[in-house]
């Protein structure tokens, strides 16, 4: 750890992992409710469990992004963080308010929560992924503004690099686009039109900038490849992400009452969205292939490579499968959508946060990397979680194909609930895979408790003189 203020990121990383565990536990509960409908009812109804599962995902990833920024920016800017005190205050505000929101979901009827939190004065609740109480959304905005001020002042007063400028751009976009969570028109078409400005332009827009900067930082530190080479890749990836992502919002505008030209724009630019993720995969493998040294933290490199591959598969390939309007007409809202969402979020954002944590946490604890034994255990967790996520995706995809055929095709399509009964086999397989994922996460946590010494860097530059040029 080069700068003392980087230590504040440990708070955010610990909170991220704790909330990640909660998210997966609720995911396992949800999976079981698909096949045992009254499991934990009425204490945790399905709609509440799903709300907690998705909200925890968003919150813990935000904690991960913030922690990554607080670790990355001082090192890139070559100066201490603008205000460690502000970072700690914002952490506790965000953590306590997030915990209260989740508890309110579990302890109060949602309508009662809306009444108590001022939703009548500024209606924002009741929409998927934006279920947070109005007062909670205001708190998120305050935390984001304070965070941006802290990071922005650090970047402005220090060294400017491609990595911290791209990261700051992504974070600014994240904060600005969240303001559309307060836009809630009475017209349902307009409501969905602007709702996607938060949901899509986060995960298929500005979050990709954050992903690219975090991945580039870890690859610079672990490979020793010249910064100029990595910067060029980041420029290309970011340009393609924004070009395809912004207009690609149109692939969510099919069949909701928007003009017909969105069928073309959404299909064409949605089909181009895998390109930045494919470039990201090439980027990661190319940088590791050109590395000047074998870094002691081998598992961080594994997470970096995994991020590229799984993001391309989940966000790219599975996204492409149902992005064209003629296909989406049948697949929209089926388990194919769920398959894409699970692998895309895991590959693009979960893995890059875990990658950043795996690189930074040993540094925050005063060592180059975790012990060799700890890294082996963490590699086991990588494969357990990644392979189980692949199977979750495959089982949901199979369920989605059967669902589309039985429910939306043919002369006599079957009713929704009858089709759901016929998908029970796939849901059981998905649940088993989810349990394996939870085991992998527990193994990941255990790896940080294993002590010992790690190997030091191994210089490989003499094996390939060309990489020095």
Image (tube, rainbow, N blue to C red):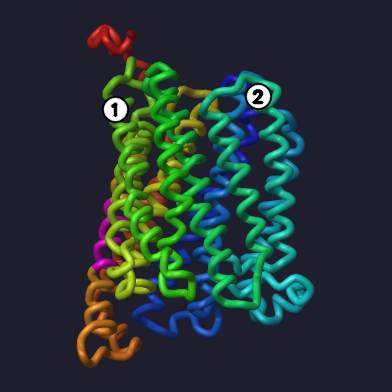
* Picture layout, residue 346 above or below residue 296: below
Left or right of 99: which side holds 408? left
Taking the spot 30% from the left edge, 10% from the top edge, the residue there is: 461
Tell me whether the residue at label 1 lies in contact with that at label 2, contact meaning CB atoms closer than 8 angstroms: no
Q: What residue did someone put label 1 on? A: 286
Q: CA distance from mark 1 to mark 2?
A: 32 Å
Quadrant holding the C terminus = top left
Q: Is residue 124 above or below residue 240?
A: below
Assign the N terminus to one quadrant of the image. top right
Picture mark count? 2
Q: Decide if residue 377 is in sight here.
A: no
Near mark 1 (Cα within 10 A), the count class, few <14, some 14-19 or many ≥20, is some
Q: Nearer the viewer, mark 1 or mark 2?
A: 1
Main secondary structure along the magenta-highlighted residues: helix
> Quick check: can you spot residue 70?
yes
Instruction: Check residue 285 for magenta coloring.
Output: no
For residue 395, the mark is: none
Q: Residue at x 32, y 19 (%)?
A: 291
Counting from the top left corner in percent of width and height, residue 204 is at: 45, 51
Which range is magenta?
A: 387-397
For image coordinates 31% across by 72% down, the residue present is 331
* Residue 310 image offset from top left, x and y in percent: 32, 47
Q: Which residue bears the numbered disc 2? A: 4
Q: What kind of element bears circle 1?
A: helix
Where is residue 81 shown, x and y percent of the image? 68, 28
Residue at screen point 62% across, 29% down: 6
Say whether residue 270 is left or right of residue 44.
Answer: left
Q: Secondary structure at mark 2?
A: helix
Viewer-proximal residue among 41 and 141: 141
Q: Earlier in the sequence, mark 1 or mark 2?
A: 2
Task: Determine the image quadrant of residue 354.
Answer: top left
């Amino acid at each position: 750890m080069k700068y003392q203020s980087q230590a504040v990121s440990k708070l955010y990383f610990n909170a991220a992992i704790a909330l990640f565990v909660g998210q997966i536990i609720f995911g396992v509960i949800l999976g079981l409710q698909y096949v045992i409908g009254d499991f934990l009812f009425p204490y945790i109804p399905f709609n509440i469990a799903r709300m907690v599962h998705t909200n925890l995902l968003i919150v813990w990833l935000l904690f991960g992004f913030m922690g990554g920024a607080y670790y990355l920016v001082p090192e890139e800017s070559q100066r201490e963080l603008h205000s460690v005190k502000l970072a700690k205050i914002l952490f506790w505000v965000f953590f306590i308010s997030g915990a209260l929101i989740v508890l309110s979901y579990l302890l109060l009827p949602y309508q009662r929560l809306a009444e108590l939190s001022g939703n009548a004065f500024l209606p924002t609740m009741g929409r998927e992924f934006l279920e947070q109480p109005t007062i909670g959304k205001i708190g998120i905005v305050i935390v984001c503004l304070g965070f941006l001020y802290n990071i922005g002042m650090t970047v402005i007063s220090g060294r400017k690099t491609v990595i911290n400028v791209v990261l700051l751009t992504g974070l600014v976009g994240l904060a600005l686009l969240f303001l559309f969570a307060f836009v809630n028109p009475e017209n349902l078409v307009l409501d969905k039109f602007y709702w996607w400005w938060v949901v899509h332009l986060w995960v298929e827009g500005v979050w990709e900038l954050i992903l690219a900067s975090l991945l580039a930082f870890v690859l610079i530190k672990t490979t020793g490849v010249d910064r100029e080479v990595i910067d060029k890749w980041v420029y290309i990836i970011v340009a393609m992400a924004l070009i395809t992502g912004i207009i690609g919002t149109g692939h969510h505008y099919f069949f909701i009452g928007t003009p017909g030209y969105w069928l073309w724009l959404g299909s064409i630019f949605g089909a181009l969205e895998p390109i930045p993720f494919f470039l990201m995969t090439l980027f990661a493998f190319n940088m590791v292939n050109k590395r000047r040294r074998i870094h002691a933290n081998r598992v961080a490199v594994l997470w970096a490579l995994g991020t590229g591959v799984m993001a391309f598969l989940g966000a790219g390939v599975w996204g492409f499968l149902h992005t064209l309007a003629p296909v989406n007409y049948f697949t929209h809202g089926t388990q194919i959508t769920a398959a894409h969402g699970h692998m895309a979020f895991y590959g693009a954002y979960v893995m890059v946060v875990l990658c950043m944590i795996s690189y930074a946490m040993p540094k925050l604890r005063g060592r180059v990397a975790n012990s060799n034994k700890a890294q082996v255990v963490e590699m086991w967790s990588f494969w357990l979680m990644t392979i189980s996520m692949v199977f979750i995706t495959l089982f949901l995809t199979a369920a989605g194909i059967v669902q589309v055929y039985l429910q939306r095709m043919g002369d006599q399509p079957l009713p929704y609930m009858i089709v759901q009964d016929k998908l029970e086999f796939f849901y059981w397989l998905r649940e088993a895979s989810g349990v394996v994922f939870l085991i992998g996460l527990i193994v990941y946590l255990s790896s940080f408790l294993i002590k010992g010494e790690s190997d030091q860097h191994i210089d490989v530059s003499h094996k390939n003189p060309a990489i020095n040029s």
